[in-house]
Image (spheres, rainbow, N blue to C red):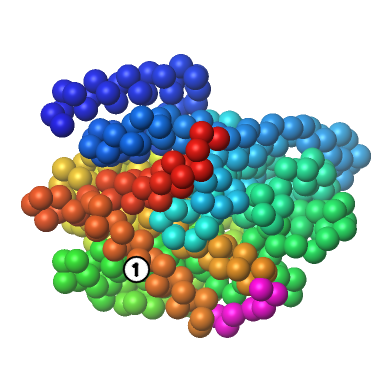
Amino acid sequence: MNNETKKKLLDEFMAKVIAKNPGEKEFHQAVMEVAESLIPFIEENPKYKQAKILERMAEAERTIIFRIPWLDDKGEIRINRGFRIEMNSAIGPYKGGMRFHPTVNLGILKFLAFEQVLKNSLTTLPMGGGKGGSDFDPKGKSDNEVMRFCQSLMTELQRHIGPDTDVPAGDIGVGGREIGFMFGQYKRLRNEFTGVLTGKGLEWGGSLIRPEATGYGAVYFCEEMLKTRGLDFKGKIVAISGSGNVAQYATEKATHLGGKVVTLSDSEGYIHDPKGIDADKLAFIMHLKNVKRGRIKEYCEKYPQATFVLGKRPWEIKCDIALPCATQNEIDGNDAKNLINNGCFCVSEGANMPSTPDAINLYIEKKILYGPGKAANAGGVATSGLEMSQNSMRLSWSSEEVEQRLHTIMVNIHKNCVKWGTEPDGFINYVKGANIGGFVKVADAMLAQGLV
């Protein structure tokens, strides 16, 4: 297919998507990125075109929006909005996180749910795609306030989820505390103990390695990409953004494999420690973020050799490998230029869609190793799927067994990307590989199940 025909078909498709979903720019961006890879493939495989598979995948099977009223510690009534986007269930029950953050809106959750469909397919586990959350901000709230909010949310959400229907997990703003409160309310209302949520505590149905999984998975995927060029992590300078769960465990695994992690960040700015963030320093960060719920700049008070840069992201620092683990669109075209000019040759995404289209185009143009989020950060949902399996069988695997399964899944996702993404000149376009690899399984299931 020539570029002119591809552009015409892409423009026609996107015009319809934008008209049906006005103002949802993150969703438009996610669909566009996938459609660019898939439209030529679909033209070569008319069965998918005739059944309008891509058009159907871009439309959620079910969108749920509801009110969440709750009482704060002063006895004042607060009102938030809750969402659950049940995007596609062709290969299994809806599966995807719940995000609590003031920026949460319909467009962001639809983008995440759309990505989740392909990501879950790539894991090869039987999971459809969904996403949900609320514009509630857990920062600065007491445990009792978070509990009352979670209970109010679950009072409505429990009508729409279940172990064979929709299995939510955590995401930004939703950790073990929030999952516990939501699970308790579900159990109370439904009078049943089932694996309706993942990310649970180990004492009540959770899986070992689940907290580590997304960060570990992004590093494992990165390791596989490096191997294609005869490289590894040893001695490499690694820049990581974020300082939450994903960033923490990406730091741990990258360090374990011989890399030197020199940056972490939060919404206020980033720290740069040229000596590297070793195991002791990481333990301090974990306590600071997970227990004290403090700010990353406090790291510099404890370790004065580090510097804190206010209001910026770490992509101006010289590095070999970048692991964006914070949030969507955190690397724009200029950031990507800085990274490449400073010697970065590998980007593996721990966050969802952290690179803008300009950044992605530059990665591909310069032929650096680039693992898009739907492939590179699939370790989290893969281990959620392993937690579902353990719940169904009423047993628990050892941490070694879960991590081995996780590693195997990430290696297989990489193989799938290589299969579908290798260009005639030998360059591996992981964007194309992940999109086509994720699409084929879902599309074939949709064809088999008829027009539903």
**Magenta range:** 393-399
Q: Is residue 227 above or below residue 19?
A: below
Q: Is residue 315 above or below residue 52?
A: below
Furthest residue to the right? 75
Magenta span has 395?
A: yes
Depth order, front residue of 128/323: 128
| Percent coordinates x, y for residue 143 in the rendering | 79, 55
Locate the N terminus and report the quarter of the image it occupies: top left
Q: Position of residue 46 (x, y in %)?
A: 29, 34
Residue positioned 69% across, 32% down in the render: 65
In magenta segment, residue 181:
no
Indicate the quadrant containing the C terminus: top left, top right, bottom left or bottom right.
top right
How far from the left and from the top, in percent, is residue 108? Answer: 52, 35
Identify residue type, mark 1.
Val
Residue 417 on image: x %, y %: 29, 56
Q: Main secondary structure of the magenta part?
A: loop
Tell me which corner region of the image, top left, top right, bottom left or bottom right, holds residue 198: bottom right
Q: Which residue is mark 1?
A: 411
Front in this rendered view, residue 117 or 209:
117
Q: Residues within 10 Å of mark 1 (few under 14, many from 20)?
A: some
- Residue at 20 percent across and 45 percent down: it is 364
Q: Residue at x 26, y 63 (%)?
A: 225
Q: Residue at x 36, y 61 (%)?
A: 413
